[in-house]
Every structure is written in structure tokens, then in C-alpha cells.
Amino acid sequence: MHQPAIPHLHAADPDIARLVEAEARRQFDKARLIASENYVSPAVLEATGSVLTNKYSEGYCGRRYYEGQQNVDPIETLAVERAKGVFGAAHANVQPYSGSPANLAVYLAFAEPGDTVMGMSLPMGGHLTHGWSVSATGRWFTSVRYGVRADTGRIDLDEVRDLARRERPKIIWCGGTAVPRTIDFPAFAEIAREVGAVLAADVAHIAGLIAGGAHPSPVGHADVITTTTHKTLRGPRGAMIMSTAEHAAAVDKAVFPGLQGGPHNHTTAGIAVALKEAADPGFGAYAHQIVANAAALATALLERGFDLVSGGTDNHLILIDLTSRGVAGKPAARALDRAGIELNHNTVPFDPRKPFDPSGLRLGTAAITTRGLTERHMPHLAAWIDEAVQAAAKQDEARLDGIAAEIRELLAAFPMPGWAPTP
Ligand SMILES: *Cc1c(COP(=O)(O)O)cnc(C)c1O
């Protein structure tokens, strides 16, 4: 059953309660490899499910528009101070509702509509909010995009520099959603400095790795850093913006009153708890284990003949190009889900297929590492992935169900925060 238990929900709304229980069970039974997901701790769950959701707190600590902030002010102050401590940043704003609004606040702080902005192209691994055409950021700004080299699958910094010199963007984004390699923050900073752009590092995927010392930090290189709090950082769904002292006032003004009303105080408390957990030495071990697991899984997949974009990974994320396997990303992802392996179909760089039916699969090791899986489990996982992809090509549903049962059996030995067998 769900942990903490949800008896009032069962009594008041059995339909929703049943679905919450079913979801908890699903998260227990499956190898969750969606690169942006994780399992938060029971402490984060409790903070997020608390009475703090009842309170309005527009403004910032000591400068609120509503009374009754005796407890919310110290909660937000703790979250801010812990963020600054964990990342070594001069300034932190913990109020953005999620990663996309955090990025919008950066545009509001540092650009005017119509200005030129630069980011990694979505099909190359960038995020929608880095100026992609269907996003508000691509419609309200003149967006120019960089990508990766066809031969290496890695960001082409010469292209980034040439494009920046030619287009003179106001903001340059680095970081992305499907980037399996280390981001070279000093190189981006040098380019941004040369052209007078604000460098915005979006570390949504890798924030936990940075906090745990398993990826270089953008602090000291980027002017502004945005991150979600719910991916490798293992907090509640939310976001933060960190910056140099110079940009602190512009960032805060953009978030409130520029873009948002009241902060979600229950989320702020959950972020504070997650940051306390991230400051614990054990979190460094967790972050390094995520990377070790991804490296071991990549090696095992390569040994089985899978093509990986960039040839491997430096972080938590692996991008598989299925072209040589004779199955597209979407049917493969659906078959893998049936086989108890949850991931998402994804475009690969220079994908010849359409975005809604692309050639690739994206996966990450943050959630399975939280469950306690280690390098020794990765060859088994790669074997199941391989078998499921073959079963997908043959539409062998019985084999897919067989794999799901084997995975359930393995995972039953690894406790999950948020669910436990009924006593
Ligand atoms: C996930 C992600 C976001 C968006 O976060 P949401 O909370 O889903 O809005 C922004 N940027 C990057 C790089 C991301 O990976």
C-alpha cells in the first residue's frame, strides 16, 4: 500500500485512491528508466502532502503581500540557504512552479520579445523552452539553434561559437533533455562572454549529479542556472533559479511579480527537505552510483550491438538509435513497457523519422539507482532490453509478459520509498 497510508482518500474518493495505489504498485513493479524521473523519499512525500498547500505567500521572505508567514518564511529561507550551500551559488530563487516557468523567467529577466536567443535544437537534445518553434520561447523570440556533430554525436562548440558571433544572441542556453555527455560550461562561458550574451545553464537533468559531485558545476561559469528539482536531484516537482549576486534582483523580479503569483509552499518545503538530503555525504555516493550504473548499462548494451548516440554516456542518460534493429522507437518503447521496462521513445540527432515516431529510445538510471540496483544488475537489464526489442520486432507478447514477471521478481527485493506490501 501507499506510504504514507492514504485512509482519508480511500474513504472520501475511492476512485482516486484506487488509482493512486495502483500507480504506487506500478512504480514498485517496473524498472523505471525514464531519464527525468525518480523516487522521492518518504520525508519529501510528507512535506509535499502537508498543510502548507493551504497558505498564500506572494512575495519573498520578509516582504510578503499576505499575513501569517511566521512558518513559511523560515521554510523558504531554509530552502534558499540549502540551495546556495549545495550548489555554491550566490543567489537562489526556489519559487518557480516547474522547469518551464523557470526558463520563461530567464527570458523575462534578460531579453525583450523579438530578441535573438540561442539554444540546442530539440531534436539534437535541447529542451522545448530553449527556443523551439512550437514553444512560446520560439514564437516570442528569434531563436537560433546549435546541434551535435554527425560523426561524434557531441555538441559542436565551433558551430556554437560561429553561430554566436554571427547572430549575437542575448541569451545562450546550454544543457538539455537528451544529452548523454558532460556539458563544457567553461567553453560556453567563454563564447557567451565574447559575444556579450547571458549564459543560462539549464541543469534540470543533471542537478543531482552536480550536487553529488558526479558532473562539473556551472557555478562560476554561467550567469544564471535553472533546474527542476524532481529529476536526479530527487525532490518534489518544482524548480529553482540560481545566479550570481549581480543578477539576483532581476531573477527574483522576473519570477514574482513578473510571471507567477503565490509560490507553492508545500513544494518549497519538499525542495528544502530534498536539498538537506542532497547535502548528506550519502548523496554523493548515490550520484556516483547513478553514473556508474549508466556506464555499466551502456557497456552491456554496446556488447549486445546497440548503437548509442555519442557512443556511450558520461552521466545518467543513454540514447539508443534503433535504426539497425529494424524497429522504430515508439513500438519498441511500448513493447518494453509491457516487458516491465519503462522508458520513452526519442528523436536521435539527424533522425530520418518523424518526431512522433522517431528512431530512438532515451533511458536513465536515476530511479533504479534509488531502488538500490548496482553495476552487477546492468548486464541483466541490457539482456532484457535486448530480448524485449527482439520480441517487439516479432510481436511476441508472451515473451514480453515473461520478461515483466522476471523484472517484478528482481525488483521485489529492492524497497521503494512510497509503497510497501500490505502487512
Ligand atoms: C525537464 C526539463 C525542463 C522542464 O521542466 P518541467 O518541470 O517539465 O517544466 C526544462 N529544461 C530541461 C533541460 C529539462 O530536462
Image (spheres, rainbow, N blue to C red):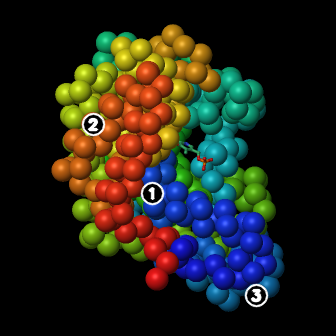
Question: Of 52 and 88, which appears nearest the observer?
Answer: 52
Q: Is residue 383 positioned above or below 78 on the image?
A: above
Residue name at image x 70 percent, y 53 percent: 254
Q: Which residue is the site of mark 1?
A: 29
Is disc 2 in contact with disc 3, using a CB cutoff of under 8 Å? no
- Residue 206 picture location, percent across and down: 40, 48
- Whether ligand 1 has any atom under 8 Å from the Cβ at mark 1 is answered as no
Ligand 1 quadrant assignment: top right
Residue name at image x 37 percent, y 17 percent: 325
Residue 215 is at least partly visible in this image: yes
Residue name at image x 58 percent, y 21 percent: 357
Give the distance between the C-alpha atoms of the residues marked 3 and 1, in whole angstroms.
Answer: 43 Å
Say whether disc 2 or disc 1 marks the residue closer to the N-terminus: 1
- Residue 284 picture location, percent across and down: 27, 62
- Residue 266 picture location, percent across and down: 64, 73
Closer mark to the observer between disc 3 and disc 1: 1
Give the distance between the C-alpha atoms of the residues marked 2 and 1, in whole angstroms.
Answer: 18 Å
- Three-letter amino acid code at disc 2? Ala
Q: Secondary structure at mark 2?
A: helix
- Three-letter amino acid code at disc 3? Gly
- On screen, residue 113 versus residue 403, left or right, reads right
Question: Of 365 and 146, which appears nearest the observer?
Answer: 365
Q: Is residue 181 positioned above or below 357 on the image?
A: below
Q: Which residue is the site of mark 2?
A: 383
- On screen, residue 207 versus residue 102, left or right, reads left
